[in-house]
Structures are given as structure tokens and as C-alpha cells.
Amino acid sequence: MSNTWFADIILPLAVRGRFTYRIPDAMLSKVKPGIRVTVQFGNRNLYSGIVCHIHENPPDFENVKSIIDIPDTVPLINEKQLKLWLWISEYYLCSEGEVMKAALPSESSLNDYRPRLETFIELSERYSDNELNGMLDNLKKAPRQQDVLSSYLRLTGYTSGSEIMPLSRSLLLAESHSSAGIIEALTGKGILKQVYLPVSRIAENESYKEPVRVLSEAQSIAYMSIKSHFTDKDIALLHGVTSSGKTEIYIHLIEEQLKLGKQVLYMLPEIALTTQIILRLKRHFGAVTGVYHSRFSDPEKVEIWKRVADRDPVTGYRLILGVRSSIFLPFSDLGLIIIDEEHDGSYKQHDPAPRYHARDSAIILATFHKAKTVLGSASPSIESYNNTVNGKYGLTELKERFGLIKLPGIIVANTREAYRRKLMVSHFTPELLQAMDEALSKEEQIILFQNRRGFSPYVECSECGWIPVCIQCAVNLTYHKGLNKLVCHYCGYTTQPPSKCSNCNSTGIITRGFGTEKIEDEIKIVFPSAQVARMDQDTTRNKNSFNKIIRAFEERRIDILIGTQMISKGLDFENLTVVGVLNADNLLNYPDFRAHERSFQLMEQVSGRAGRRQKQGKVIIQTSDPANRIIRLVLRHDYKNMFKMQAEERETFNYPPFCRMVKISIKHKDRAQLNHFSDILGNDLKAIFGKRVLGPESPVISQLLLWYIKTILIKIEREKPPAKAKQLIIEAIERLEKEKGASALKIAIDVDPY
Ligand code: ADP
Ligand code: ZN
Ligand code: ZN
């Protein structure tokens, strides 16, 4: 009797555990780890799952179902991808199915995947030079046909008997300023013919690739330093001031890997940044360069997916520029992962699960490929810098800007003082106004940073202080003037602004504080002849809006750009000389152990946009607390002391990187029930972990979409492997889930939550 084989299958569900199915004998030869299979789950539902593990151990339940179908002939995901899925699920305490959902483009687009065909034109047979000349002569009476034919010959470089190259029909039309009818006339005569080819199969014209630039002396030293770290370490941290030429060093490291036939993943925290860097990369590396981010449609994602899986050195992607989800692409042979702006909080996914950190996961991915990792930043995370102090990572520094341009001069403008002396013009200090005036008179450009979007953070009754809040989340509503609506930035709920106070009936409703939209309004009044634009979540909802704003700023069609976080990172504008930080206070006062690190990074980052070419830039930081320690450190661009101060504080109070943290959030629609259940879990955990458990407490946002929320924070020691502690946490949650009435709870686990 032959043995019975089983497969453990990952299904796209948020349920912990794997699902075991029998492999019918006829399918035995086809079932491999990573292959897609169709199975029945529940009563009727058919699911596509991914085979994870094949074995001979019958599961301990009756009526084991069999795999129904295998739609693909080859595994959809490779062994290294599967390993990464399993690592993420284990480390971040989520189901393998949740990782699967985040990692794969949607099911239907995978099934419907057809390569996109494009019409190409080619010469219908080989001609000698004489014959060609004769043909062109014969077309004298049809000069537009003659034009098209000679354009084709010019663009493909065809000469007597050489290889016939297909040319994109749309390109030919554009280049010869011709119409479809003219091309048809030529195909009718049998001179040209149409062919249909998949777009991705055609390598773009490679002839205009630019050689990489020669590194400056400081850059060469840094480059060699990274290479020498790589002889005994897998990870190097490149700490280089803004505009020191880090990107140029990455380009050299990339070139070297591509020459070795390896793939490279270049990660950025923000889609907006990909726009400029992709052009720089394509200039040197051409068509093997691809971009990946969440704004692509599912069919586009599938196309990119296939090209990454394509191992052909011409048609496949060898270099991917991507944001966090790009770690899930089907790389087969990575030699290097670059994580630029490695300190950036956007690398962490908060919701939904998998709540993974893309930098940390990429480092793991690199080990599966035996690849090296470069982390780059002008203000590294405390974690990464600490890893250079303890010798885990190599440290490479670049202390000067490329071309020895000076770092921008920073001016701290005291808003409290300016208000007192009545020198403020709306939200602008005299220092900022003067710098802006000067820049505008020299036709230089300006960026103003405000980390809140909308018009006003809230409206308030001037009589009694009543503030309208979201009916679903209990969060203050933000006033958007363009919409004339109050909007909840957490759930999107909108409502009319009230005409009177619902507490005291007073009509004295006033707006408080300011967001990007309000700044835009006021700037237009103060500088009526300047061109003003705004870049925030509200103005960049569709795929091309980033490009449009960035392009317009590059082409100097915008004088003043106002924006949130988005404009603070990585962008490189030639003519930008003045950067204003409108309100540093609300960065510094955020209630979070990372607030100081983050505000230092943000101010350093946003100042880094100024004066990147010939001219030295100027940065004006507005604050009511000019003596603040962090601001003093930013003034001197003093990263090292910021690190020392933060590291000491974190060690004293036991925060990361000196411990690991796991955050559990528990939600219930009834406040009393929530308190009841969160206390049960809190006490259970305290019996195991003692003082290392903080909470349950109400988070800053304690109600969201009609759900009340409580959080419990557990600090786990660094020295011990976290698996044991995590297991105990899972078991405590499973005990809670068995309590009567606990099914109405929503429980989420977040590992390394900040
Ligand atoms: P960073 O990534 O550190 O902010 P970039 O790599 O963007 O710095 O470099 C800053 C500016 O200097 C860019 O405009 C870049 O084109 C230029 N630059 C950097 N290195 C070189 C080089 N070796 N040769 C010519 N230009 C360079
Ligand atoms: Zn009132
Ligand atoms: Zn809401």
C-alpha cells in the first residue's frame, strides 16, 4: 500500500495555525512548497492557498479533505519568499494567511494575468541599401509615407541587410508626426508589417545609458569603508549629512552587484520619493530598473511581480526601487538591499496585520539571500546607531555635503516673543517673513513644513471651550475650509461646521491652531504674487499627483510649497534655499518615548532640503521654546549628542533598543465590557511578566469607529530570545478568548510597535 501524503496549506485568513489537506495520488508529483492549490474551507468556500510543507503525518481530525486543484504548473512563490512569510508571522505574531494577503497581488489579477501586447512595426523583409534607396525614391509622390519609412530606418538604425528591429507603433507615429492611415498604406504595400509583442518582452532602448559618476574623494573613502565592513559584517550604516552624496554611493554599489548578475532592492519610505530617484537610476541602469508601491493597480503589480521573477538578464528586473511591501517580491538572487532613510517611521506597518517593520524584515530577507545590507540616513534611528556602537553593524560617515556646500544655517524664531511684541503676521515670525522675502526677490524657492493637514486642527466655542468631536472616534474634528466641512482624520467621518455651540448655544465658534490648508490661504494673502502649492494627503490622492507637484516645483512653476511629512524627506531641488518649520512645538510635545528622536530627525531632514546646490540654504524653525535641548542640538546638526542623550534615557527607563516591546490593543463596543476583559488579560499577563506589563490604559485615541480601545504594553528583555515570551503572550490571549462573551472583542498584537 502506498503512503498517504499531506500538505500544510496557508490560507488567506486571519486565523492562527495551518490547514492540513490530503494530496490525491495523481497530484503528488505537482505539489511542492510555494505552489498554489485550490481547497475547500468551511462548508462551501473555495480558497486558493499556498503549500507550505509536505509530510506523512495524518492530522488528528476526521474527514481530512483533499486538495481540489492545482492551477499553476510552477510554484508562485519561491523558497526564500516562503521563509520570509514564516519569519514575519512568527516574529510579528500574526497568521501566515495575513502575511499572504499582504504579500500577494489579488487572486483574480493573478489568474487574469495576460502580458500586455503592444503593436510594433517592422520592415517586412531584408533589403539592400540600393533597394532601400529605390523604395524611398518611389515614394517621392507620397512624401508622408516617405517620412514614415525614413523615420523607421533612422530610429532602428537599419542598414543594408542588418537585423530587422521592431519599433513601437506609437513611437513611430510620434517621431514621424504621422497618422495611422500612412502606416497602413505602407503595410498595404508590403513594405512594413505590424507585429504584436508583449510590452515587457521588449527591452527599452539601452543606447542612452549614462555611465555612473566619478565619486569625490570623501565619497570614495566612504565607499571603500562600506566595502571593507562587508568583509566581516553583513550590514553597514551610512551616516551621511543631507546632500552628502549617499545616493551616488548607492549607485556605485548597485552597479557592482548588477555586473555580478545579482539583484538589488532599493527601499524608500515614501512613494513621493520614488519619483526623483527612479529617473536617476534609470539613467544609469536602464530597463532592468523597476518601481513597486501600493499605488499600482493589481494588474500592474502582477506585471512587476512577473518581471522580478523573470531571470532573463535583459527582460527581467534586476533593480527594484520600492516602498515597504517590495520585500514580498519574488527575488531569486539578491546581492544587496539598500534601505534609505532607514530611521523613517513609515517603514512600519501599523494596520492591518502583518504589523511588520520593513527595514527589520528586509535585513532578515538579506540573510536568506546571503546578501549585504546598507542602511542610510542623515539622522539614523537610535536602534541602528546603537548597533554600530555594539559592533553589529559597520559605521561609515560622510560629514560634508557634496561639492563642499555648507549645511544650511538654522535660525530659531521665538513665536512667544513675537506674539508678545505683536510682530507676528498671521502664523509667521519676522525672521521667516524676511527670509521668504529675500528668497522671492532672488526668484529662489521656499518650502514650509507643517505636520498637520487641513485648515484648523479644531474649532472651539469661544464662550465655553466646547469642541466638536467625531461621533465614532471621540477625536477632535479637523476643519477643512475648501470643503467647508469638519473631517475626522481617523475614520473619514465628515459633518457641517456647527453654527452655534451645542453646549451653551453661543454663536462664537472660532477656529484654533493651523494646518497646511490654512497656511496656504494665509501665504496667498501675505505674498499675493507668489505661486503657492500644497502637498499633503489631501492633494495627492491619485497616482500622478506627487509627480505633478514635484515636476512643477522642479520647473519653478511654484515659488512656495507647503506640506506635511511628505516634503521633508529625500527630495532634491536645485533652486530651493529657504525652509520654514512653522511649529516645532507640536513635534516635541508628542506623548511618545520617540518624540525627541523623531523631532530631531524631522527637523534635520526637512532642513536638508535647503541649499543643496551652489547656494547655502537657510532654515527657520518657529517655536515657543527656543531653549529646548533638541532644538539646540538641531542648531548644531549635532547627531552624536542627540544619540547619547537618548540612549542614556532609554537605558535608564528601559525602552527600545534596550528592551523589546509588544503592544496588545483590545477593542469592544461597550466600555464596561472592555474594562472587564482588558483587566482579565492585564492581570493574567502581570502574573507571568510582573512589572514588565504596563496598563491596561486608554491610548491617546481611545475610541475609533464606535470601538472603545485599551492597550497593554509588555517589555521583553533583549538578552533572551523573544520566542518564549511571545508564546506566553499568545497563550494568555487564547485564555482570554475562551472567556464567556469574549467573542465580541477585537484583539490586535503589535510587536515593536513604535
Ligand atoms: P544624499 O543622497 O546624501 O542626500 P545625493 O546623492 O542626492 O545626496 O547628492 C546631492 C547632490 O550632489 C545631487 O544633486 C547629486 O547629483 C550631486 N552629486 C553627488 N555625488 C556626485 C558626484 N560624485 N558627481 C557629481 N554630482 C554628485
Ligand atoms: Zn459654548
Ligand atoms: Zn472618526
Image (tube, grey):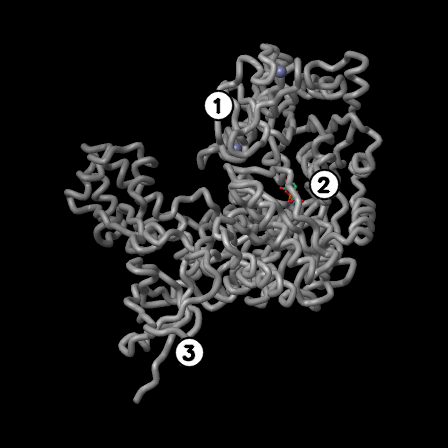
* Type of amino acid at the residue the image marks with label 1: Thr
Q: Is residue 500 above or below residue 101?
A: above
Instruction: Decide: few, some or many residues near mark 1? Use Cα within 10 Å; few <14, some 14-19, many ≥20.
Output: some
Q: Is residue 614 above or below residue 267?
A: above
The answer to which of marks 3 and 2 sits earlier in the sequence is 3
Q: CA distance from mark 1 to mark 2?
A: 32 Å
- Taking the image as drawn, is residue 613 in sight? no
Mark 3, ligand 3, within 8 Å: the answer is no
Instruction: Label 3, secondary structure: give it.
Output: strand
Q: Is residue 690 above or below residue 280?
A: below
* Type of amino acid at the residue the image marks with label 2: Ala
Instruction: Label 1, secondary structure: give it.
Output: strand
The answer to which of marks 1 and 3 sits earlier in the sequence is 3
Residue at the outermost top position = 507
Q: CA distance from mark 3 to mark 2?
A: 49 Å
User: Camera-side residue: 160 or 31?
Assistant: 31
Q: Position of residue 261 (x, y in %)?
A: 51, 64
User: Camera-side residue: 399 or 621?
Assistant: 621
Rendered image: mark on residue 486:
none
Could you tell me which quadrant the N terminus lies in? Answer: bottom left
Q: Which residue is mark 3?
A: 55
Q: Which residue is mark 2?
A: 595
* Type of amino acid at the residue the image marks with label 3: His
- Residues at discs 1 and 3 in contact (Cβ within 8 Å): no
